[in-house]
Image: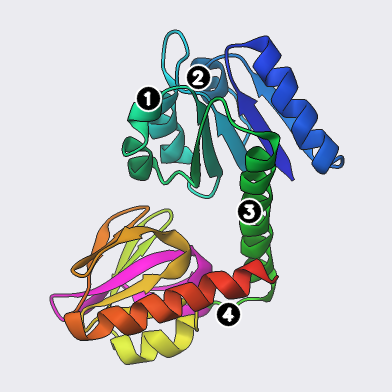
Amino acid sequence: MQIVICDDEKKIQELLAEKVQKLYPTAEVILFASGQELLWSDKDPDILLLDIGMPGKNGMETAKEFRRRHKKTILIFVTAFAEYVFQAFDVGAFHYLVKPFTDEKFLEVLQSAVKQYEGRDYLHEKGTPPFMILSGGEHIMIKPEEIIYAEVFNRKILLHTIDSDIEYYGKMKELEKQVGENFYRSHRSYLVNFAFIRKYDVKTIYLEKGQALMSKKSYHEFVKCYHRYHQKRGKQ
């Protein structure tokens, strides 16, 4: 497990690194002193602890650029600036810690993030097997865990994946069976992956890339299934 800490204050870097390594001594901890330094690196961390108030490119600007290349990194803001909390949704932040915070709170958030990381790894190795589709005359292997959501578009299915959008002729009912229980049919035209949901309301599900409609009759059942999904992952 690789954990990156990006903060311009050396004392904060060392303090956070000490807390991380005390709890997870086998983790690889890497330190960066600026957002630009992080973006220039070739690291693809499992968890990123990111400050916002840094000189040059601030943490929120860094996060937006970072997300273009690193879709799966679990992002935790560690900052003294509470006013950016709502913008954190736009970059798929896992949590937003406002300084000062207690050791107990930091460890609680870090442990939750590690559980999510371990859950993703578990699903990758033990999850629903990949399946083949025919798109534009090409046979393409699809991994369910890489699908963010699917929608019906012009009588075709449009798969929005981590890396690309793929369209093919198929039926949503058949796709539901292929992707497994970590997905939910929120609307007759939409199928969403629980792993990529950032927030939701009675009309819309906001994902790490794009959004899906929520039908009124599906809302309450969706909430139950979504909570069940997180409970299951918490036990893994």
Farthest top residue in view: 55
At 64% from the left and 67% from the top, the residue drawn is 234
Q: Are marks 2 and 1 in contact (CB under 8 Å)?
A: yes
Residue displayed at 38% across by 33% down: 64
Q: What's under tag 2, amino acid-wise?
A: Gly
Q: Nearer the viewer, residue 208 or 99?
A: 99
User: Callout 4: few (<14), some (14-19), or many (20+) C-alpha neighbours within 10 Å?
Assistant: some
> Marks 1 and 3: CB-CB under 8 Å?
no
Provide the residue span drawn in magenta: 131-157
Contact flag, marks 2 and 3 (Cβ < 8 Å)? no
Dominant SS of magenta comes to strand
1 vs 3, front mark: 3
Which residue position is annotated with label 2? 35
- Mark 4 highlights which residue? 128
**x and y percent of residue 17 in the render?**
75, 27
Quarter assignment of residue 152: bottom left
Residue tagged by mark 3? 112
The residue tagged 1 is: 61
Which of the two marks, 4 or 3, is nearer to us in this view?
3
- Which circle's residue, 1 or 4, is located before the other in the chain? 1
Answer yes or no: is residue 133 visible: no
Q: In this rendering, is residue 228 above or below 33?
A: below
User: Is 145 one of the magenta-colored residues?
Assistant: yes
Q: CA distance from mark 1 to mark 3?
A: 25 Å
Name the front one of labels 1 and 4: 1
Instruction: Indicate which disc, 1 or 3, sits on the residue closer to the N terminus.
Output: 1
Query: For the residue marked with disc 1, what is the amino acid?
Result: Glu
Q: Position of residue 196 (x, y in %)?
A: 43, 60
Ranked by sequence position, the earlier of labels 2 and 4 is 2
- Find numbered disc 3 in the image and state the secondary structure of the residue it sits on: helix
Residue visible at 22% across and 73% down?
214
Q: Amino acid at mark 4?
A: Thr
